[in-house]
Amino acid sequence: MTLPRDTRNSLVGTWQLVSVKFELTDTGESMDMYGPEPLGYLILTPEGRLMVIETVRDRQLPQNDVDDAALFKSMLAYSGHCRVLDDNRFVTNVDVAWHPAWMNTEQTRAFEIDSDLLSVSTVGMVHPNFPGRSGQAVVRWRRVSE
């Protein structure tokens, strides 16, 4: 699905991850999901394919199953077809994801662009790392010069 022209001109491209904040609704606790200097990219094509990967910086090679589980919780990745709802919201129909809970779901996001910075926020969600608890994520990206 192709994005509308005005949104395509502003959203399409490659964005480098700046920060990922998550605030739990029940306690108000706010955390850097992947540390103060996370690694990641968001890529959005003119045809509407969105791909996201976010990780903790300096992840270590696993030595055992416990380490493997920790690595899984130190990342997020998904992809799907994206459609714009209005001037500040889009939905991704997820067709591949790091966590099976997101497979074949619709992920709605609000967004705001200020120059080369893109802020994307969830519209309330349950994150797989916090089962049964809702919260809001705010993810900030910087446009990569091509």
Image (cartoon, grey):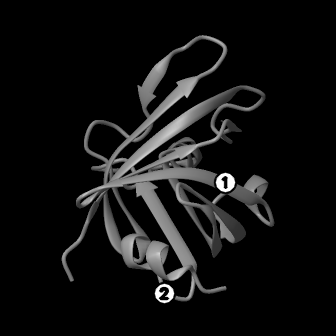
Q: Residues within 10 Å of mark 2 (few under 14, many from 20)?
A: some
> What's the residue type where badge 2 is placed?
Pro
Nearest the camera: 140 or 71? 140
Q: Quadrant of the C terminus?
A: bottom left
| Location of residue 24 with respect to 71 vertically, above or below | above
For mark 2, give the secondary structure. loop
Q: Position of residue 109 (x, y in %)?
A: 59, 52
Q: Residues within 10 Å of mark 1 (few under 14, many from 20)?
A: many
Nearest the camera: 129 or 46? 46
For mark 1, give the secondary structure. strand
Count of numbered marks: 2
Q: Is residue 54 left or right of residue 114?
A: right
Q: Which residue is mark 1?
A: 108
> At x 59% / y 22%, what residue is drawn?
24
First of labels 2, 1 by sequence position: 2
Query: Between marks 2 and 1, how big is the CA–CA gap?
Result: 19 Å
> At x 58% / y 48%, what residue is drawn?
65
> What's the residue type where badge 1 is placed?
Thr
Residue lying furthest top: 27
Q: Quadrant of the N terminus?
A: bottom right
Q: Which residue is mark 2?
A: 46
| Location of residue 83 with respect to 71 vertically, above or below | below
User: Can you see residue 82?
Assistant: yes
> At x 25% / y 44%, what residue is drawn?
37
| Location of residue 30 with respect to 62 vertically, above or below | above
Q: Is residue 42 left or right of residue 15?
A: right
User: Can you see residue 44?
Assistant: no
Label annotation for residue 83: none
Q: Is residue 60 left or right of residue 1?
A: left
Residue lying furthest left: 145
Q: Position of residue 35 (x, y in %)?
A: 33, 37
